[in-house]
Image (cartoon, rainbow, N blue to C red):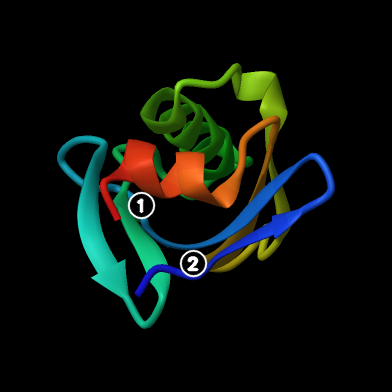
Amino acid sequence: MLDIREDTGGVTIRVRVQPRASKNQLAGEMDGALKVRLAAPPVDGAANRSCCEFIAGLLGVAKTRVEIVHGHTGRNKTVRVAGITAVEARDRLKY
């Protein structure tokens, strides 16, 4: 099951990123983390920016509401999304 935790004003979601994929897409769930394939390379923060934009699009929130709070240099990240609940996040992600 996807690990989505609610805190004051938003949720945190564990994400596993695969950079340099052919296109941006969801690839399912892996050990409680949302698996995301991104076309951006892991250079100069491009994959991190792409990750935030992609998750914002999936959840229907502004990209300024999405931030990486842990894992800036690795594939395993924790992303915080402000302004939604865990129930809304699961509904929008279909998990």
Three-letter code, disc 2: Arg
Three-letter code, disc 1: Pro
Compared across the picture, whether 44 is left or right of 10 comes to left
Q: Is residue 51 above or below residue 76?
A: above
Compared across the picture, whether 21 is left or right of 1 comes to left
Q: Position of residue 50 (x, y in %)?
A: 47, 33
Q: Could you tell me which residue is drawn at 40 percent across and 49 percent down?
A: 90
Q: Could you tell me which residue is drawn at 41 percent across and 44 percent down?
A: 41
Q: Is residue 75 above or below residue 53?
A: below
The residue tagged with tag 2: helix, strand or loop?
loop
Q: Position of residue 49 (x, y in %)?
A: 57, 33
| C-alpha span from label 1 to label 2 | 8 Å
Residue lying at the far bottom in this picture: please name it.
31
Quadrant of the image occupied by residue 40: top left
Q: Position of residue 69 (x, y in %)?
A: 75, 55
Q: Nearer the viewer, residue 52 or 93?
A: 93
Dot label at residue 19: 1
**What residue is pinned by disc 2?**
75
Q: Quadrant of the C terminus?
A: bottom left
Dot label at residue 93: none
